[in-house]
Image (spheres, rainbow, N blue to C red):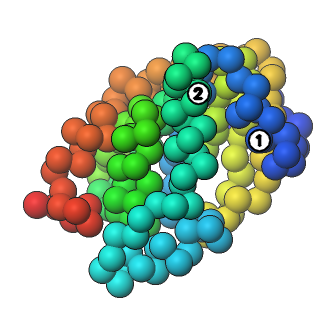
Amino acid sequence: MNTLQRGKPIGWDEVEHLFAEFRSTVFRLETLQRYEAPTEKAAFQNFLAGDIPGSPDLDDWHAELREGIRRGRSYRRVHVVTEPLTDYVRFECAWAYRSNAAAGEDIRILAVEEGRWPEGVPRLDYWLFDSRLMLVMNYSDGGVLESTELVDDPQTVAAAEAWRDRALRLSVPYTEYEARFDAFMRPR
């Protein structure tokens, strides 16, 4: 995070509490081209073998999305993706983003050429809760989540809001982006 305030390390129970307790808005910036999540391993292998698996692993998230939206909450996400897409991003789009968008999450894609990065958008994965708390997601080079940090420093949160706004302005809705591809997220 360069010179911005570092956060307090927190565990997964505290992260789940943030999702349960936020009032109105949550935003996610994703910047990696591959994430290594044990719960996705089998689905990813099936995808590479030519099958777009269902998303029963996402059922709880979809239920949470629908209930939150029913209660007036907003869920937004921007993923900065490099083109050509990695196999993992193709998988994430075909497997998770389609069903998440159908459940009501506002997913947007900011596509850039490989080797380029959008000005004003950091290479930093984070969640922003109600524009007052920032959850920084620290990943290894291989995309394994190593730690999470909770930041409540007003200057850092304001920077995260500016990055969010810039990413939203530069991105397109997932459904618009998806229209350029076949079912496996390969260019038409």
Residue 136: give its label: none
State whether residue 161 is above or below residue 2.
above
* Tags 2 and 1 touching, CB below 8 Å: no
Percent x, y for residue 7? Answer: 83, 35
User: From the viewer's perspective, is 120 left or right of 109?
Assistant: right
| SS assignment at label 1 | helix
User: From the viewer's perspective, is 177 left or right of 49?
Assistant: left
What is the spatial separation of the Cα atoms under label 2 and label 1, in whole angstroms?
Answer: 14 Å
| SS assignment at label 2 | helix
Q: Residues within 10 Å of mark 1 (few under 14, many from 20)?
A: few
Q: Nearer the viewer, residue 117 or 52?
A: 52
- Residue shown at 64%/28% (left/top)? 128
User: The residue under label 1 is which amino acid type?
Assistant: Glu
User: From the viewer's perspective, is 152 left or right of 117?
Assistant: right
Percent x, y for residue 105? Answer: 45, 35
Image quadrant in which the C terminus is located: bottom left
Q: Nearer the viewer, residue 39 or 81?
A: 39
Q: Nearer the viewer, residue 164 or 6?
A: 164
Residue 28 sits in which quadrant?
Answer: top right
Residue 49 sits in which quadrant?
Answer: bottom left
Q: Residues within 10 Å of mark 2 (few under 14, many from 20)?
A: many
Residue 68: give its label: 2
Q: Nearer the viewer, residue 105 or 139?
A: 105
Q: Which residue is mark 1?
A: 16
